[in-house]
Image: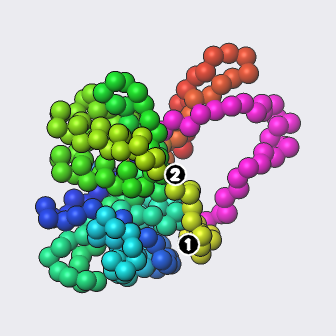
């Protein structure tokens, strides 16, 4: 599971579309606060802690992904930190307002759905017979599911799963038809990232210490630490921010070497 901000809904006529990231650069990220930690009241992301990113997008306003039918747009958008992965993967979901034509159309990024399309946020579907299928990074199927969900007024995800048994019969039948089509003509998973990813990595441009991954210092192990297996369960938002980004609660289920699994209390 992954926390993501509440998205902008756009106008009733706006259409969901896929957008490929052609270029991305950091325009501004300058938290202006005197203290190291700042607490805000309310469930929102303050602008000063949300990077402003300049993006060049190729938008496919129809089901056809032929570049000749797409249009390109450039703009600056504030990107929630947890959704920067959608830019890295190069796949986003946007709302396109059809009131104008060509590149003059208003394009609004839809960050939670972009995280789904990028594969950062996993997605599964449980059918009417109780069978569960993973649809993570199956881009075309997910886009069609998102359009059905928008037309239905929203389909709730229980964790990372959409359960058709909890939907109204009409919406469940539309989802089931997509599943039947996928069984007949299976769609391959899109790559986690696409060529050119290194040009879109923005984390190295942000202020703060460089992150270290994939290693554990010997000093830590000499102090009595033991390497064990853990499963990532959830990332939750808080209303506290530090100079270099949000403070998040991370929930892990740890398998101790000498007992049954147990969940950790939230850790920053």
Q: Is residue 226 magenta?
A: yes
Q: Quick one: SS at disc 1?
A: helix
9 in relation to 127, above or below: below
Q: Nearer the viewer, residue 256 or 132?
A: 132
Q: Quick one: SS at disc 2?
A: loop
For mark 1, does the 10 Å Cα neighbourhood hold few (<14), some (14 to 19), or many (20 or more) residues? many
For mark 2, does the 10 Å Cα neighbourhood hold few (<14), some (14 to 19), or many (20 or more) residues? few
Residue 159 in which image quadrant: top left
Q: Quadrant of the C terminus?
A: top right
Say which mark, if any, is on residue 189: 2
Residue at 68% x, 31% y: name it: 229
Image: magenta residue range: 206-234
The location of residue 265, given as percent across then percent down, is: 53, 30
234 in relation to 51, above or below: above
Q: Nearer the viewer, residue 154 or 253?
A: 154
- Whichever of labels 1 and 2 marks the residue nearer the N terminus, that label is 2
Q: Is residue 232 magenta?
A: yes
Q: Nearer the viewer, residue 209 or 182?
A: 182
The location of residue 259, given as percent across then percent down, is: 68, 15
- In this rendering, would 62 be left or right of 232? left
Select label 1 or label 2 by which is in front: 2
Q: How many marks?
A: 2
Whether residue 198 is visible here, answered yes or no, is: yes
- In this rendering, would 16 be left or right of 126? left
Say which mark, if any, is on residue 200: 1
Distance (Cα) linking label 1 and label 2: 21 Å
Q: Quadrant of the N terminus?
A: top left
The location of residue 224, given as percent across then percent down, is: 81, 31
The location of residue 55, given as percent across then percent down, is: 43, 77
Residue at 31% x, 48% y: name it: 145
62 in relation to 164, above or below: below
199 in relation to 111, above or below: below
């Amino acid at each position: 599971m992954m926390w993501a901000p509440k998205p902008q809904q756009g106008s009733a006529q706006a259409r969901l579309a896929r957008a490929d990231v052609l270029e991305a650069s950091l325009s501004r990220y300058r938290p202006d606060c005197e203290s190291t930690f700042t607490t805000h009241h309310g469930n929102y992301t303050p602008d000063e802690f949300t990077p402003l990113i300049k993006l060049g997008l190729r938008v496919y306003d129809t089901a056809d992904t032929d570049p000749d039918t797409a249009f390109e747009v450039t703009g600056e958008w504030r990107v929630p930190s947890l959704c920067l992965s959608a830019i890295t993967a190069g796949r986003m979901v946007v709302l396109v307002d059809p009131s104008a034509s060509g590149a003059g159309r208003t394009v609004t990024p839809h960050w939670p759905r972009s995280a789904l399309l990028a594969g950062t946020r996993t997605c599964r579907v449980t059918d009417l017979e109780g069978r569960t299928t993973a649809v993570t990074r199956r881009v075309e199927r997910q886009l069609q599911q998102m359009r059905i969900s928008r037309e239905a007024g929203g389909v709730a995800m229980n964790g990372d799963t959409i359960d058709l048994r909890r939907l109204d019969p009409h919406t469940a039948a539309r989802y089931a038809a997509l599943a039947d089509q996928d069984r007949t003509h299976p769609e391959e998973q899109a790559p986690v990232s696409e060529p050119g990813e290194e040009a879109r990595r923005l984390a190295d441009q942000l202020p703060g210490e460089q992150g270290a991954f994939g290693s554990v210092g010997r000093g830590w192990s000499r102090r009595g630490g033991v390497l064990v297996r853990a499963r990532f369960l959830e990332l939750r938002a808080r209303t506290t921010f530090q100079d270099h980004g949000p403070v998040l609660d991370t929930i892990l289920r740890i398998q101790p070497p000498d007992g049954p699994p147990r969940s950790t209390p939230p850790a920053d």
